[in-house]
Image (cartoon, rainbow, N blue to C red):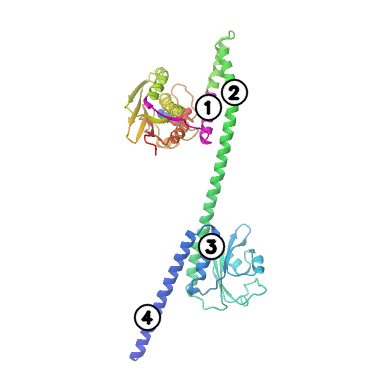
Amino acid sequence: MDTNSIVSKSLDKIDSAEQEIRQRTEEYRVLHEVARVLHNSQGLKKKLENTLKVLTQFKELEVEYKAGIFLADEEKRVLKLFSTIGNFTEEFLEKEQEIPYGNCLCGRAAISGEMIISESCFSDKRHENIFKDMTDHGHYIVPLKSQEKMIGVLFLYTDANPPWYVRSQEILLSIGGLIGDAIVSHRRGEQILENNKQLKELNELKNKFLGIASHDLRNPLYLIRSFSEILKDESVGAVNPKQKDLLLKIFNASNFMRALLENLLDISKIESGKIELSKKVQDLNSIVRQQVELSQLMADKKKINLQLDLEDLPPISFDQDAITQVIGNFIGNAIKFSPFNTKIIVTTENQIENIRFSVGDEGPGISEEDQKLLFKEFQTLSAKPTGGEKSTGLGLAITQKLIHLHSGQVGVESQLGKGSTFFFTLPLHWK
Ligand SMILES: Nc1ncnc2c1ncn2[C@@H]1O[C@H](COP(=O)(O)OP(=O)(O)O)[C@@H](O)[C@H]1O
Ligand SMILES: [Mg+2]
């Protein structure tokens, strides 16, 4: 071999290496661009249209500015035309709205899940759908899949018998996967939005129902409660011991129902946004003292030692009724779930950013599993009342909602067998 031909061979090699690099760079650019438009475009139609545009500009493919995407309806086994770019005849757009699986090129790709390269619409027998002014052309038909599930089919137009791009199969299938995944994730997003909307509506309906039911039940219940009280107290005449016992049972049951109804009303009011806090700047410690005093009797019955450890606090803004209810619930729970002859400490602390209120008890403690459920509605957990008290499992749910309305936090520190400390914080400085 002479020097000249060695040089020319080397030049050829360099040429083809350069060509290879150019193609790879172009592939990388197109993949990158497809991923970008799928991610950034708003709405599925725009995502797919923009992707088609990027593909028609993919130089090595040499395709026309004319392409489209069918979405698969797996149940009906049809492909439905979803988006196109470029010029299509009216006849095409009408007839191709829906094509059955197995029909023509796209229907075949939908069944096999494999890409089809078709040289010419006239000589390729698989190209069954022929249109009036159709001129000879070839196709890339690309299945769009996501995790092996058929999502749709993409079709591109080329000249008849084009110089097929060597790595078209590999690259178009990857792009088909990207598009398939994007369609699935778009649908999931839509589904989540729809589900959320339905859940919100259902929750509103539930609150309305709760509100109406508890409101309408309240009056008759109050009648039962006060009449049974009058009868058992013998205000309207003597009753025998057996009757008295039954009346007491009616009275106790209606008391429990009253508490339950009040709680249900609270929840429906808070959740439907109908509760209006009337906040004012005041001293938390004095509310705490009052509540402890009110709870003293209950504590005495169980020989529970109720102690106070209150730090000096700056005045703070809160709704008195709401916070009184919360404090009452924490102290009430501590007494209710603690054994006789134990100690409960009620604490307030100034933590600069927040004020923290807490109630620590020597009760049964709460497992980590139960701690996750504590603040949800209707959770009566493994700790049971120790003195025959009633339990509805609504107190802490209401507590949490009320504290959140104050932009505060609630929580518990506890270990099974080692007592519990329930706390809430209220922010000192309102943003
Ligand atoms: N101090 C506590 N110690 C142990 N368990 C508790 C304590 N406070 C609450 N719990 C558990 O959390 C559940 C929910 O409390 P709550 O929502 O106030 O409802 P209720 O007091 O009506 O049972 C209680 O049934 C109890 O099992
Ligand atoms: Mg409670």
| Disc 1 to disc 2, C-alpha distance | 12 Å
Structural distance between the alpha carbons of marks 3 and 2: 61 Å
The numbered dot on residue 195 is: none
Mark 1 vs ligand 1: CB below 8 Å: no
Secondary structure, mark 2, is helix
User: Of tags 3 and 4, which is closer to the observer?
Assistant: 3
The amino acid on which the numbered mark 3 sits, given as a three-letter code, is: Leu
Q: Position of residue 157 (x, y in %)?
A: 56, 72
Horizontal side of 176 relative to 296 (left or right) equals right
Name the residue rendered at 54%, 11% in the picture. 233
- In this figure, which residue is indicated by the disc labeled 4? 14
- Mark earlier in primary sequence (1, 2): 2
Image point 41% across, 71% down: which residue? 25
* Nearest to N terminus: mark 3 or mark 4: 4
What segment carries the magenta color?
Answer: 256-285
Q: Above or below — where is 384 with respect to 242?
A: below
